[in-house]
Image (cartoon, grey):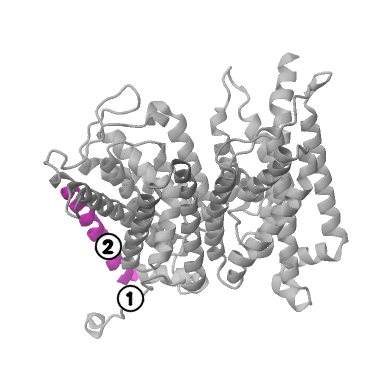
């Protein structure tokens, strides 16, 4: 077995693709938490809405769930994002006029309700049986080029979202959000519609999360109830953003890649242990990831790549 | 007549029992939110911890869970004080939402620690089969009576503590206005410690009651979190009596919502009970965020 064996290459491609999908989630969370200071404890809800909408709209007809729309991905993914955005809008309208804790409680509630719907409404989602045969883009290509092409698609999406988020960060909209995050009273006093700005950031972030869900459904080609798992979807993304540096889009991407590499590398290590220890060590890993979050939160609150305020507008632009 | 007795025995009484358990958890969430100003996400898992600590004594020493309850409550309170010292105290002056993130982390750490120590298998307290008592239409299991009476006793004790003791009064003062309380010479950190002891102790009691009523498993805390938050919001944040009323109301609503009101099918499928709690919470947040008992909105 050499470094350049096919197995190792596949592992690297998978590692890169998953890091990219998590980077999309992290960029979405950064729009909500880093830009606007909104605590979303239900990332899994928007991820699952995106994943299930994309899967249902693109798969062939099946007696097990609501399928057979046969839409192309370019149509299905935007619909998935719009649906997640609509749910986020409804939640945001209700909770964002109150203190952040209420949003946290409501998002954990919506995540739980989405989880129950996916589990119980088998006509819609096939319940615990899951949705198989989801088409993956480029799968007609020969190996390893199919995996390379999909990874390229994920990276391209990360780059597009990063670019858009950077533009947003430096825009008047992003500056207003930062002001609201740091002092909503002061922002309201200079005439900013605090709730409206927060709802916009929350909806946009949820739409990005839905895109990550759609990507993951098409990547795994199978979608089951694990898409609603709070540990893997919500908690891990929070750790990634806090470690990487909330408020910094590069930090979000770096944190996603770093934590995902740590997470999957430790899995590789623990899988070599004797049977009984595999399950035990999986809990130790969760415990350690939790501890990393606490240490970073207390000692390195800015994360690896600290937030940088957008540059001041130079004279040339100002005089226009 | 059978319809009425079914309604009482299969929906009303279980709803009351579940409501008592929710009340015990919601008191802690409401008190902590009032005094430390953050939504404590790890509270459900403190109930799980209490239930598992009692398992130690019921499984190895053959104790009754009622005898193990006080020790489980003390143990959970000690763990809560340790968690506060390690993970919450550093954020006292930070914006409250950072503490929420920390508690979110503590939630998963507690759960994985429980899974590590006790495994993922379902545990039960071996209390044997006790036949229900029949009183006319009513068919009551002895454990239902003990859970309701014990909850009532704990709530009365809490009321006496909050209204009669210096510490209880200090606690209410800190909840109303922490700065004013501090300048009038109240030791706020002492109040915080006792809030944890009371909140965690009551949570452990609720967890043990769940074990007595059904079973103990590692994800029970997660399943409880939504109804507990709903109960705290319904009763009004920072209002312990409101949390009791909210817990009872959420428990009863969840059970009664599954009654076949319109047709022969349950009005709401039993699998959607947590969604009922969520709906109540959303309605309260729209209509009256202060809750029924005029709590505070932050």
Task: Give the SS element for disc 2.
Answer: helix
In the image, taking residue B281 as reference, residue A46 lies left or right, namely left
Residue B294 can be seen, yes or no: no
Q: Which image quadrant is residue A55 in?
A: top left
Label 1: chain letter? A
Task: Give the SS element for disc 1.
Answer: loop
Q: Position of residue B173 (x, y in %)?
A: 77, 67
Magenta stretch, main secondary structure class? helix
Mark 2, other Cα within 10 Å: few <14 / some 14–19 / many ≥20: many
Look at the image and give the residue range highlighted in magenta.
A148-173
Mark nearer the viewer, 2 or 1: 2
The residue to which callout 2 is attached is A162
Identify the residue at image location x=29%, y=40%. A220
Residue, far top: B1
The residue to which callout 1 is attached is A310
What number is the disc on residue A211? none
Residue, far right: B164
A74 versus B131 height, above or below: below
Residue A81 can be seen, yes or no: yes
In the image, taking residue A207 as reference, residue A113 lies left or right, namely right
């Amino acid at each position: 077995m050499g470094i350049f064996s096919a197995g190792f290459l596949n592992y690297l491609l998978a590692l890169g693709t998953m890091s990219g999908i998590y980077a999309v989630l992290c960029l979405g969370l950064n729009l909500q938490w880093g830009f606007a200071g909104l605590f979303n404890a239900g990332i899994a809800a928007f991820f699952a809405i995106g994943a299930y909408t994309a899967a249902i709209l693109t798969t062939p007809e099946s007696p097990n769930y609501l399928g057979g729309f046969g839409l192309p991905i370019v149509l299905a993914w935007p619909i998935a994002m719009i649906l997640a955005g609509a749910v986020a809008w409804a939640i945001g309208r209700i909770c964002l006029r109150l203190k952040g804790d209420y949003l946290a409680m409501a998002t954990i509630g919506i995540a739980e309700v989405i989880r129950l719907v996916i589990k119980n409404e088998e006509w819609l989602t096939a319940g615990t049986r899951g949705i198989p045969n989801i088409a993956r883009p480029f799968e007609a290509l020969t190996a390893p080029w199919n995996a390379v092409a999909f990874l390229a698609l994920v990276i391209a999406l990360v780059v597009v979202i990063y670019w858009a988020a950077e533009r947003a960060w430096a825009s008047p909209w992003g500056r207003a959000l930062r002001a609201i995050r740091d002092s909503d009273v002061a922002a309201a006093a200079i005439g900013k519609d605090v709730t409206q700005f927060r709802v916009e950031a929350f909806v946009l972030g949820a739409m990005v999360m839905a895109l990550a869900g759609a990507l993951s459904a098409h990547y795994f080609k199978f979608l089951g109830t694990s898409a609603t798992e709070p540990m893997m979807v919500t908690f891990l993304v929070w750790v990634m953003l806090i470690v990487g540096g909330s408020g910094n889009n590069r930090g979000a991407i770096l944190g996603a890649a770093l934590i995902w590499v740590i997470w999957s590398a430790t899995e590789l290590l623990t899988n070599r242990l004797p049977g009984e220890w595999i399950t035990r060590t999986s809990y130790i890993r969760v415990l350690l990831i939790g501890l990393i979050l606490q240490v970073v939160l207390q000692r390195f609150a800015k994360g690896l790549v600290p937030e940088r305020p957008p540059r001041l507008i130079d004279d040339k632009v100002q005089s226009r | 007549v059978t319809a009425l007795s079914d309604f009482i025995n299969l929906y009303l009484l279980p709803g009351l029992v579940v409501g008592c358990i929710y009340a015990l958890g919601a008191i802690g969430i409401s008190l902590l939110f009032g005094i430390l100003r953050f939504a404590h996400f790890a509270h459900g898992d403190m109930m799980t911890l209490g239930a598992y600590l009692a398992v130690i004594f019921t499984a190895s020493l053959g104790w009754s869970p009622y005898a193990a309850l006080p020790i489980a409550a003390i143990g959970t309170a000690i763990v809560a004080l340790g968690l506060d010292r390690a993970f919450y105290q550093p954020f006292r002056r930070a914006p409250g939402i950072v503490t929420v993130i920390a508690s979110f982390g503590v939630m998963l750490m507690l759960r994985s620690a429980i899974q590590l120590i006790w495994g993922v298998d379902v545990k039960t307290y071996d209390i044997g089969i006790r036949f229900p008592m029949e009183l006319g239409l009513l068919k009551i299991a002895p454990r239902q009576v003990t859970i309701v009476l014990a909850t009532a006793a704990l709530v009365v004790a809490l009321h006496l503590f909050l209204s009669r003791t210096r510490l209880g009064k200090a606690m209410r003062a800190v909840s109303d206005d922490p700065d004013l309380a501090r300048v009038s010479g109240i030791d706020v950190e002492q109040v915080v410690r006792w809030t944890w002891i009371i909140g965690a102790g009551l949570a452990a009691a609720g967890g043990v009651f769940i074990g007595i009523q059904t079973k103990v498993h590692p994800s029970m805390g997660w399943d409880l979190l939504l109804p507990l938050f709903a109960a705290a919001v319904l009763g009004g944040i920072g209002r312990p009596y409101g949390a009791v009323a909210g817990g009872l109301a959420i428990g009863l609503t969840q059970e009664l919502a599954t009654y076949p009101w319109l047709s022969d099918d349950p009005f709401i499928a039993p699998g959607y009970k947590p969604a009922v709690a969520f709906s109540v919470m959303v309605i309260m947040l729209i209509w009256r965020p202060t809750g029924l008992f005029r709590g505070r909105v932050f």
